[in-house]
Amino acid sequence: RLVVSHERHPPLLSPPPDPACWIFPSTTPNTRVKLNAMLAFRDLTRSRAVVAVSALLFLTCLSSVAAFTPASGFHGASLFAMQNTRCMGRAPALGPRMVATPERATPASMFAPGQKVGPQQPGQESPVKYEYDNQLLDKNKVEGTKADSGHLRFPLQQEMADLDEISISHDSMIILKHHGSYMQQNRDLQRSDKAGYAASYQFMLRLKNPCGKIDAKTYQAIDDLSNKYGQGDLRATTRMAWQIHGVKKENLKKVIAGIAEVGGSTLGGCGDINRNIMTPPAPLADPAYQHVFQTANFIAELFKPSSPAFEELWMDAKKPKDVEYWRKDMVEGSTGKNHIPPVALTLEELDKKISEAQAFDQGTGIITGDPEEPLYGRCYLPRKFKIAVTVPGDNSMDIFIHDVSLIVIMDEDGKTLKGYNVMVGGGMGRTHNKESTFARVNEMLGYIPKEDLTEAMKAILATQRDHGNRQVRANARLKYLVHTLGIDNFRTLAEKYFGKSFQPAVPLPEWHAVDWLRWDPPGGGGWVLG
């Protein structure tokens, strides 16, 4: 059973109810100490006792807070002595939330050791003054959670080890998204079965499938895993990915590891990082389309988080048995007759090229200095980052609604890649009854030669990383930054990071909404069905 799922609106979740559950997550150099409490308001006769017990717990635990202070570069060890406690990492569903937060977020409090640039100290100065302030994060707790996570590890690592609990805290949910999963509940039980609803915590997993491609081995694996550990169906999403629903917490690691072992991955399926990259769903041998697919594969690897947290949490710090199938597509001779233009001769050479491309520093403020995340830094991006790649005229993935859209420009011979037109600032999401949020189509940024692809894309990502709105999360997407600056000022700012100018865009033909729902000859024999 296949269900089309809309990625932009995952179910809204409430943290699991757990009275009198107190949390002291890791204190980082910003001395953020979160204190959460749920008071039993419905039982007023016990309120004094609750306050007294809570105060005692606070005084007792406060003396131990200094023990919970791993550095941001800390690799893989457990954080808390409280790992085995019943309400470790749990966030209350109701009641006041008291947070001790510095008045201003500074580089010292929000950067990783060695990090030099980021949202509190941009690599390049903006040509205009913003109405928002990325040093004022009191209304956006997600930024503090990412900063405290040790590069996507905590508190998720501890809470996943506690299998007596069927759910995880709100902070862990934020971190889990970057690993490709959301926690959900069965809404059908919300009114009819309160007890059943409270016990219905489950997890959705979203795969990363660049170009919408999935190989037979990975598809067979997710089909089997859904039958064994999920609700027995697979969902094809509007961004060309696949989702598994209904996975219980105790089985989550098995499912994520099972996908990775056969050459799939959920890393980057969700979260404030680069998401699944879309292309036309047409496996054609035409050279322009082949360059589209290879460009998408390359950027997917270029913008993959560098932190080893994924392997540490789900693979016991081991490499999967097989490599991702899209990485195989980038190696010489790996995909047969209708072969995508290769990036490298071997997987080892590919790994070296990707690593060097990520770390290359031309001194324009792109590289953060964070040794674990040279491109993203300690707090990653303000919001999700969506990319699409296509050929001129093929609008099958709606080229105007992505953060960044690339249009492949071929040489006159029709076989040689020449460069790319680049568009920025699109997105369809908005918040109901919040007029400061809106849908927006992207605009033409300019043209780049093919040899400038890596640094141009890194420059756009760094522009959003440093200048996107982190004070108000609802306005954090790249489209709001482009809207705030205007396309000309955005181009000026991005060019400072790029170190070059974007050239005038190559004229394009009219766009057509091709659906590919038909039989087509891919070239080289045979037919494909869309």
Image (tube, rainbow, N blue to C red):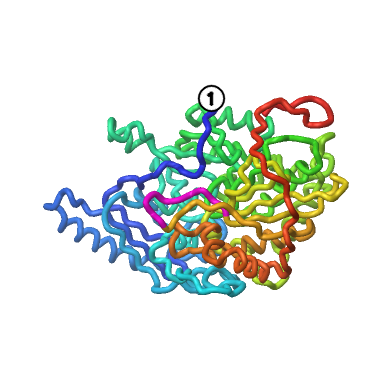
Does residue 505 appear to the left or right of 222 in the view shown? right
**Where, quadrant-wise, is the C terminus in this rendering?**
top right
Seen from this angle, which residue lies furthest front? 510
Q: Is residue 354 visible?
A: yes
Q: Closer to the camera, 38 or 367? A: 367
Q: Secondary structure at mark 1?
A: loop
Q: Position of residue 189 (x, y in %)?
A: 33, 32
Number of numbered discs on residues = 1
Mark 1 neighbour class, 10 Å CA radius: few under 14, some 14 to 19, many 20 or more: few
Seen from this angle, which residue lies furthest right? 413
Q: Position of residue 509 (x, y in %)?
A: 72, 46
Q: Is residue 458 above or below residue 331?
A: below
Q: Position of residue 112 (x, y in %)?
A: 55, 68
Residue 431 falls inside the magenta stretch = yes
Report the magenta residues as a range. Answer: 426-435
Residue 396 falls inside the magenta stretch = no
Q: Residue at x 56, y 31 (%)?
A: 225
Residue 61: quarter of image: bottom left
Dominant SS in magenta: loop
Question: Of the residues shown, which amino acid type is indicated by label 1?
Answer: Arg
Q: Position of residue 147 (x, y in %)?
A: 49, 63
Does residue 86 appear to the left or right of 425 in the view shown? left
- Label 1: which residue? 1
Q: Is residue 88 visible?
A: no
Q: Residue at x 68, y 39 (%)?
A: 280
Q: Residue at x 84, y 45 (%)?
A: 414
Does residue 421 appear to the left or right of 197 in the view shown? right
Residue 500: quarter of image: bottom right
Q: Is residue 162 above or below residue 520?
A: below
Q: Residue at x 61, y 45 (%)?
A: 276
